[in-house]
Image (cartoon, rainbow, N blue to C red):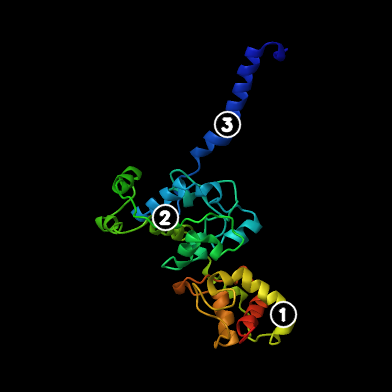
Amino acid sequence: MLEKNPVIFIILAFVVIMIGTTITMIAPFKWINSESDKIAEVKPYTPLQQEGRDLYMREGCNNCHSQTVRTLAADVERYGNGGGYSKSGEFVYDRPHLWGSRRTGPDLARIGLKYPDPKGAWHRKHMADPQSVVPASNMPAYAFLNTPLDTTYSERKMKLLKFPYTQADLDDLKGKTEMDAMIAYMRKLGTDIPVKKAAAALQTPVTLKNPFSDLKTVEKEAEAIYKQQCASCHGEKREGTLGPALKGSARSDAELFTIISKGIEANGMPPFAASLDAQKIWKLVTYIKLDSK
C-alpha cells in the first residue's frame, strides 16, 4: 500500500501536482499572449504613467483594488464602462500584472473611461480626500502624494521595459508630483481599448418629453439617485463642486436628459445611459430642475 511507503507516496503526489500545474499553468503560455492576442490600440506607458504605476504598487493599491473585469454580466455592467470584460491583450505591457482578487474597493480596469476628465480633477479630489466624493468610502487619504516626483530612475525604467519614450516625455516629468503621476496612471486605465461609444445613444427615447413633471411623485427616489450618482461632483445640495451648480438649471428637460445619458467627455462627465434607465434619468432631470428644496 502506498500509504505505508511515504517516499514513493510523496514522489507520486509530486508527479501528479506537476502534471496538473503543467496543464493548467505552464502549457497555456504556448497559446496565450501571442501576436493574435495583441490589441493594436493598447500602447506602452509613458514615463509619467509608469511612475504612477510604480507608486500604485508602492502604496499597495492592488491589495484593495483589482484590475480585471470578469466575464460575468454583472461585472461587465458595473465595471466595464463600455469596454466590456478584460482581454489578455490589455496587459501585454504590465510587468507585473495587477489583476488582483480582492475588491475592498471597486475594480479599476476601466477607471479611465469612467472619469475622462483631461485634468483629472475627480481623481485629484478623491485621492486627497476620498470621503469628500464617496462618503461611505473606507479608503485612506493620499494627500501626502503632493510631493515632488523622484525621477532618478525614470529613463532607466523605460529602457529596461523597452518602452518607447522621447526626451520631451522625460522633460515633462520636471515639476510633477507623485499625485500627478498617480492620476496619469489612473486616467490611462481602460482608455486604450475599443469602446462602444454608441451605448449611451441606445437609451435615448424617441421623444424627449419628461413624464415626471410633478416632483412629489418621484422626489424620494430622485433624491436618492442624485445622491448616489451626482452629489460627489455637483454637491449634496446641487451647489456645484467639481462640476457646475445644478440647482434650478436653466437647461431644458430634453437637453439635461441628453447630457446625463451621453455625458460630456471634454468636461470629464461620464455617460449614465449604461447604468441608469430612461425613467431614472427623467427623475434626475425633474430633481435638478427644482428651484429650491
Tell me which amino acid carries mark 2: Leu
Q: Secondary structure at mark 1?
A: loop
Is 287 left or right of 263, judged from the image as shown? right
- The residue tagged 1 is 218
Spatial separation of the CA atoms under disc 3 and disc 2:
41 Å
Q: Nearer the viewer, residue 121 or 28?
A: 121
Picture layout, residue 11 above or below residue 200 = above
Q: Residues within 10 Å of mark 1 (few under 14, many from 20)?
A: some
Residue 109 vs 224, above or below: the answer is above
Q: Earlier in the sequence, mark 3 or mark 1?
A: 3
Looking at the rendering, in which quadrant would you find the C terminus? bottom right
Within-10-Å neighbours for mark 2: few <14, some 14–19, many 20+: some
Q: Is residue 38 left or right of residue 1?
A: left
The residue located at (60%, 70%) in the rendering is 229
- Residue 253: where, in percent of width, then height? 60, 86
The residue furthest left is 167
Upstream in sequence: badge 2 or badge 1: 2
Q: Nearer the viewer, mark 2 or mark 1?
A: 2
Q: Which residue is mark 2?
A: 145
Quickly name the residue at label 3: 21
Residue 138: percent from the left, percent from the top?
59, 55
- Using the rendered image of the protein, determine whether residue 40 is visible from the camera's viewpoint: no
Residues under numbered marks 3 and 2 in contact, where contact means CB atoms less than 8 Å apart:
no
Above or below — where is 184 with respect to 159? below
